[in-house]
Image (cartoon, helix red, strand yellow):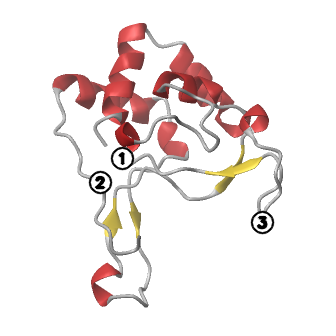
Amino acid sequence: MQLLAPPPTVPLSPQTAGGQQLFTSIDCVACHKPTMQTGPSTVSPALAFKTVHLFSDLLLHNMGSLNDGIAQADAQPTELRTAPLWGLRARAPYLHDGRASTILRAILFHDGEALTIRNRFANLSASQQQAIIAFLESI
C-alpha cells in the first residue's frame, strides 16, 4: 500500500471548480485538508517529504451520532479519524461502516464537530450541493 500511487484526479470542469470553492468556503477543509506533507520514510527516500492531496487531516474528531461506539487505541467511542477523500468516486458505499449509499447521505450524516459545517452544506441550493459532490467525485 505504501508504494501505490495516489488515485488519479479528474480535470476540473466549471461545475467542479465551483464545487471546490464551495467546499472551501463552507469550511469542509477544517478536517478534510486538501494537502499534507509526508514525513521521513524508512521505505524509500522518494516517499519522504512529498506533498499529497488526500483531503484529510488524519486526526481524530468527535463525530457525535456518526460514531461507531468503539474505543480503539487513542480513539474514544465518539471519535473517528478523518477519512481521506481522494479516490472517493471509486469506493461506495461511504463512511467507515458503509451506512451511506451516496456521497450526499455521507455528508448529511456528519455530526459532532462537523455539525455546523454539515448545516452550512444543507443550507446550500441543490445545484451548489451537486457542485460540491461533483468536486468530490473528481478527487
Inspect the image, locate mark 2, and give the three-letter code of the amino acid beneath it.
Pro
Q: Residue 93 at x, y = what percent?
A: 51, 34
State the CA–CA distance, disc 3 to disc 2: 29 Å
Q: Which mark is residue 74?
A: 3
- Going from N to C along the chain, the mark reached first, 3 or 1, is 3
Q: CA distance from mark 3 to mark 1?
A: 26 Å
Q: Where, by quadrant of the figure, is residue 22 drawn?
A: top left
The residue beneath circle 2 is 7
Q: CA distance from mark 2 to mark 1?
A: 5 Å
Residues under numbered marks 3 and 2 in contact, where contact means CB atoms less than 8 Å apart: no
Q: Which part of the image, by quadrant, shows the C terminus? A: top left
Image point (82%, 55%), residue name: 76
Counting from the top left corner in percent of width and height, residue 17 is at 24, 31
Q: Residue at x 80, y 45 (%)?
A: 78
Q: Which residue is mark 1?
A: 87
Q: Nearer the viewer, mark 3 or mark 2?
A: 2
